[in-house]
Amino acid sequence: MSVPADVRVPPRTARPSGPPGPRPRGSALTRLDARLSPYLFVSPYFLLFLVFGLFPMGYTLWVALHDWELLGDQRFVGLENFRLVLTDPQFWNAVLNTLGMFVIATVPQLLFALVLANALDRRMRGRLVARLGVLAPMVTSIAAVAIVFGQLFSRDFGFVNWVLGWFGVDRLDWAAGRWSSWLAISAMVDWRWTGYNALIYLAAMQSIPRDLYEAAAIDGASRARRFWTITLPMLRPTIVFTAIVSTIGGFQLFTEPLLFGNGDMAGGSLRQFQTVTMYMFENAFRRFDYGYASAVSWMLFMLILVGSLLNFLWLRRVGGTR
C-alpha cells in the first residue's frame, strides 16, 4: 500500500541504549506501603496482647515457682506449688464444682439459644424489639441480677420455693446443698448468656441461602425437617465457636457464685459451690499466698486448654466440621 506524497510520516524515535534509569520514588513507597500496612493495622492487637496477655502469663509462671508472700521473702521452690495443688482436696473439690456448673449451665444454654434463634429468624410482628430484648440480660448489672436471683431462690420467701410448694415439695435451702446451689447459679448464668448465643446463631442463620429452604419446602419437608437437615449442618462452625467460648467462660465462673454466696470466697460452709477461680482468689487475697494462687491459675489455664480442645474434637467428629 503506497503512502500519499502529501502525508508525512513522523520519524521513529530511537530508544536510548543502556540500562534503564531509576524508577520513580513513589512506586517504591507504594510497594513498601502495600507490604507494611497489613502488619501496622494488626500490630495494636498484638502489642496489647503482649503487654496484657503474654507478659502477665509469664510473670504468673515465675511467681508460681516461688514461695511468694506479700510481705515475706520470695524463695524459689521450683514445682513444689504445683505438687501441692495436685494433692490438694480443696482444689479438686473446686474443679468438681466448676465442671458440674459448667455442664448444667452450658448444655441447656446452647440448646435453648438454638431454639430461640430459630424462633427469632421467622417472620413475626415486633421482631426487631424481640431481638433487642434478648440483649437485656447482658446490659443488666450483675449485682442486680445476683440480688434478684438470690430473692428468687430464697429459702423462706423465695418465688421458686413458693411454686414448688404447689406440688407438695418442701422448702429448699438452695445455697446449702451442692446440687441445689449448682442449679441456682446455673439458672443465673443461663439467663445472662442465652440471648448472647442466640444472637450469634441468628446471625449465622441469616447467612444461610433461602433457596435451600425453598427447595426443601417444595419437596415437602416440614419445618422440623428443614431445621435438622439444613439449619443445623450449616451452623456447625458457629456451634463449635459458641461451645469453645462457653467452655472458656464456664471454667472461669466467678462473679455469679461469689454474689450468690454474699461475697463468701469459700463458696458456702462446705465449699459446695466454690469454683477454681474463687479458690485462686481465696489463696491470693485472703491467705496472701501468691505463689500457690499462681500455680492454681496455671492449672486453671491447662484445664481450659484441655477442655476446649476436647470440646472442639468431639464436636468436629460428631458434626463433621472441618
Image (cartoon, helix red, strand yellow):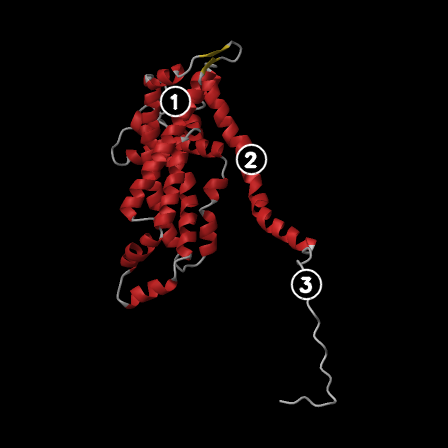
- Is label 1 or label 2 in front? 2
Which of the marked residues, 1 or 3, is nearer the chain's N terminus?
A: 3
Judged from the image, the secondary structure of the residue bearing numbered disc 1 is loop
3D distance between C-alphas at marks 1 and 2: 34 Å
Question: Label 1 sits on what residue type?
Answer: Gly
| Front one among 234 and 137 | 234
> Which numbered circle lies on residue 267?
1
**Mark 2 and 3 residues: CB-CB less than 8 Å, in contact?**
no
The local crowd at label 3, few if under 14, some if 14 to 19, many if 20 or more residues have their Cα within 10 Å, is few
Whole-percent x and y of residue 18?
67, 60
| Residue located at (33% from left, 30% from top) | 99
The amino acid marked with disc number 2 is: Leu
Residue 260 can be seen in this image: yes
* Residue type highlighted by circle 3: Ser
Give the quarter of the image for residue 255: top left
Residue at disc 2, secondary structure: helix
Distance between mark 1 and mark 3 Cα atoms: 87 Å
Residue 12: give x, y in percent of width and height.
70, 75
Q: Is residue 190 visible?
A: no
Give residue 17's mark: 3
Q: Residue at x 37, y 21 (%)?
A: 268
Q: Would you place residue 120 above or below residue 172 in this image?
A: below
For mark 2, does the 10 Å Cα neighbourhood hold few (<14), some (14 to 19), or many (20 or more) residues?
few
Which residue bears the numbered disc 2?
48
Q: Nearer the viewer, mark 2 or mark 3?
A: 3
> In x, y percent, where is residue 247?
37, 36
User: Who's the residue at 51% across and 27% down the image?
Assistant: 56
